[in-house]
Image (spheres, rainbow, N blue to C red):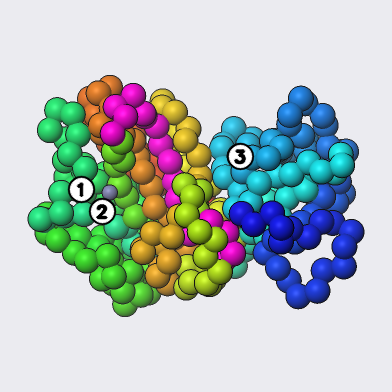
Amino acid sequence: MCTAMVIHAGTAPAAASPLQRESLDTLARRYGFGAPLKMGMERVLRSQYSTVVFTAGSRKLRFNDTLLCLNGPALNKSATWTITRHDSRNMLDPLLRPSATVRGDDIATIVLDPGHGGSDSGAIGHRNVYEKKAVLDVAKRARDLLKAQGLSVRLTRDQDYFIPLSKRTSLAHRWGADLFVSIHFNASANSSVSGIETYVCSSPGFASTMGGRADPRTYKGNHFDKKNTLLGYYLHRGMLKQVKTTDRGIKHARFEVLRTAPCPAVLLECGFITNKSEAAKVISRQHRAALAKGIANGIMSYIAKTESRP
Ligand SMILES: [Zn+2]
């Protein structure tokens, strides 16, 4: 990010800039935490319900047992710790007040989007694992679990055919999707890399987690920034409760399906099929069923918050 543009707490903010910052002391007071605790390079906000851990100069944020990436780093300047106001509003607030974020939303139609298909095989991993086949199986299993809960669930493809990215979210729009979940497996040139990561749309004015420029544009998907955080959190946590693997965190990217989604949306990378042991797991039906259960549980956790009482 452009540190020259950082406005520190205490300076008079004019128009809302995503880069304005808020101190952890202010956040602690607002959400009923005690004073931030010092732990080496980290600062911790702790209450009886939640523990939030910030690291100086890093975007990494640990919320209870889950790793998330802020849009901008936590900074420690002159002993004042700050995060961007954007992250305070769109990441911390929904995590700390989930019901207030989604209460009353009517979630009836879920669109699951198995990545790739047809001539686009996606990644091809160890033991001849094809991403396009594995994601379709996981999506169908998640669909069946969610249908059993009385939800209407549509798949952007239910067989092995090619479907362009733009069509995936236009179908979601046409079907009146209330939530959109794109399902993928990951690949890396480094075969030792493993684990699950979850993506939500990068926010305007910030670079994506993996780098690139700070894009100032507001995309359709950014209208759901708060809800994207919450959906990403429940899905990521849901999967990690079901399968034992590395938590690579909830990250930001401007993938086309996330930019153009007509509703809260996430993209799941359910493991690296270029990693020998993770590919071996993906071959197993039980593992794919566990991932599907994690996805369905994550969606049901999100829906439960829409139904909570004030
Ligand atoms: Zn993919």
Q: Which of marks 3 and 1 is nearer the N terminus?
A: 3
C-alpha distance separating marks 3 and 2: 27 Å
Q: Give the residue at mark 1.
A: 122
> Which quarter of the picture shows residue 129?
top left
Q: Do the residues labelled 1 and 2 touch (CB within 8 Å)?
A: yes
Helix, strand or loop at mark 3: strand
- The circle on residue 60 is 3
Q: Which of 268 and 18 is in front in this view?
A: 18
Left or right? Give the position of 108 relative to 183: right
* Position of 234 relative to 125 (above/below): below
Residue 294 in the magenta stretch? The answer is: no
Instruction: Please report whichever mark, 3 or 2, sits nearer to the chain's N-terminal start.
Output: 3
Q: Where is residue 150 in the image (x, y as percent from the top left)?
A: 37, 58
Q: Does the residue labelled 3 lie within 8 Å of ligand 1?
A: no
Residue tagged by mark 2? 115
Q: Is the residue indicated by label 1 positioned so its CB lies within 8 Å of ligand 1?
A: yes
Residue 254 picture quarter: bottom left
Quarter holding the N terminus? bottom right
Q: In the rendered view, does 135 fall on the left or right side of 108?
A: left
* Viewer-nearest residue: 173 or 14: 14
Q: From the viewer's perspective, is the residue at label 3 or at label 2 nearer?
A: 3
Name the secondary structure under disc 1: loop
- Residue type marked 2: Gly
Where is residue 128 shown, x and y percent of the image?
12, 33
Provide the residue span drawn in magenta: 189-207
Q: Which amino acid does label 1 sit on?
A: Gly
Q: How crowded is mark 1: few (under 14 residues within 10 Å), some or many (20 or more)?
A: some
